[in-house]
Amino acid sequence: MSRALMIQGTGSNVGKSMLVAGLCRAARRRGLSVAPFKPQNMSNNAAVTADGGEIGRAQALQALAAGVPLHTDMNPVLLKPETDVGAQLIVQGKRLTSTSARDYYDLKPTLITRVMESFDRLKARHDLVIVEGAGSPAEINLRQWDIANMGFAVPARVPVVLAGDIDRGGVIAQIVGTQAVLEPLDAAQVRGFLVNKFRGDPRLFDDGYSAIEARTGWRGFGVAPWFRDAWKLPAEDALDVDAPHRAVGLHVVCLCLSRIANFDDLDPLAQEPGVRLNMLGPGRALPGDADVVIVPGTKSTRGDLAFLRAMGWDVDLAAHVRRGGHVLGICGGYQMLGTSVADPDGIEGAPGSDAGLGLLQIDTVMTADKRLTNVSAIHAASNQSFHGYEIHIGRSEGADRARPFAHVGGEAEGAVSATGRVSGSYLHGMFRDDRFRAAWLAGFGVASSGAGYDETVEQTLDALADHLETHLDVAGLLDLAE
């Protein structure tokens, strides 16, 4: 009979995604058929699934750790923020609507049904399902509408282990305080705790660990030190991107837009010794020594076009191009590089049209149809084949489309300026392809390290599982599953 275990956290960004990925790999190495599951996720970093939908990137990594194909049942509710108060709602892989935070609560009673459908299907197909919570169950003001934490775990009867983050401080209060505010029924669903992200000698926390056990009565499953190779795995939050700091190399600058999406496109470049990757945050000017500027994907093209201008990056980009620098726009970033972006039906926000950055001669019109597909392409400049994926709305046409970035199925894809220094493409994931990455870097006179990105990710997942096996009671955690 299939079993399930849920990892919840004392807050956001305590390492739940990594813990679930590591446990999935550990369970797989024990010969179990295991699948990840997250009832509700909020992220603009998504992956295209084998069944033609999209899920959060963290669940894609967890599926890789589990050795199973990506499926929309692994993340049945995905919220992709478009504004500070609204998001696109993806249900079982497909866009349902755009909704405000207030209106979303009215949809929760119907969404829990879809969540349970997906969970039941996963359980029917696998020996074990490892579930990741969202945020914290201590947000008791949201409990009435919750489908992500106890609102799922209690009706699904899934045992919960609570993870605390010692790196941010106050981990004793995090865990003991969570128990203190939970209703008795919810607290009873928690079977234990663990402490994550410890730096230094874990034995120094023995007294604190014992205090948590004594005050909660919960079983402790160990203290996990900081996993130093986490940067080698795709991150779900742009703030988590921790590229190595290098003083030399091809200087690639990525603009961290306010609604940045699918920024893990840059992860393979971060691992190249010949590349100096700079994730440029708000309020910072574009460095004058940048070789390549990447304008990444975004969940709100017109919104982030306004944000980019507010940061002064439009002026910086124009100066960068005048100096002979290169620009690559990916997906929404590609759309911004054009002469105009029109959204007549208000797909991503208020209806209207905005002037683009004018670095590519293309015009984009947003459409209701969303393209979700894995593709094989040929890079026009190098004639190198590669694999990627599309996840976007909108069509782009114009004179620079006569110089495509790539060809897909014999059709032109993307655009390149007459100078060849500005290019754009709808294709995500291109740098994951080792041969393409090497060819692209060679165009700038940089040699690739030759390390296989996918192989590096696999090795890091094994190392993550080893890390958890060494420091946590993994056997006890898996035995806890019901």
Image: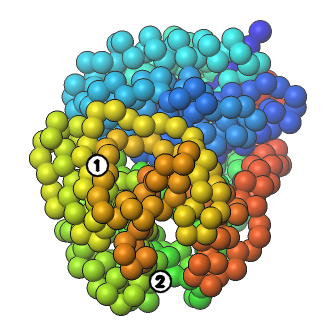
* Front residue of 117 and 297: 297
Task: Give the image location of residue 20, x and y in percent.
Answer: 66, 38
- Where 259 falls versus 81 (above or below)? below
The residue wearing badge 2 is 291
Q: Secondary structure at mark 2?
A: loop
- Crowding at dot 2, Cα within 10 Å, few <14 / some 14-19 / many 20+, comes out as many
Residue 149 appears in the rendering: no
Residue 168 position, x and y percent, is: 51, 57
The answer to whether residue 229 is left or right of residue 47 is: right
- Comparing 3 with 282, the one in front is 282
Residue 363 visible within the image:
yes
Q: Residue at x 77, y 70 (%)?
A: 450
Is residue 468 toward the left or the right of residue 441 in the image? right
Quarter holding residue 452: bottom right
Assign a secondary structure to mark 1.
loop
- Between 399 and 250, the one nearer to me in the picture: 399
Residue of label 1: 300
Q: Quadrant of residue 72?
A: top right
420 or 55: nearer the eye? Answer: 420
Name the residue rendered at 57%, 82% in the picture: 444
Could you tell me residue 69's position as x and y percent? 68, 31
**Earlier residue among tags 1 and 2:** 2
Q: Viewed as shown, does residue 81 lie left or right of 133?
A: left
Residue contact at pointers 1 and 2, CB within 8 angstroms: no
Q: Give me the residue at 77% from left, 9% from top.
A: 1
Residue 26 in the image: state x and y as whole percent.
80, 38
Mark 1 or mark 2, which is nearer to you? 2
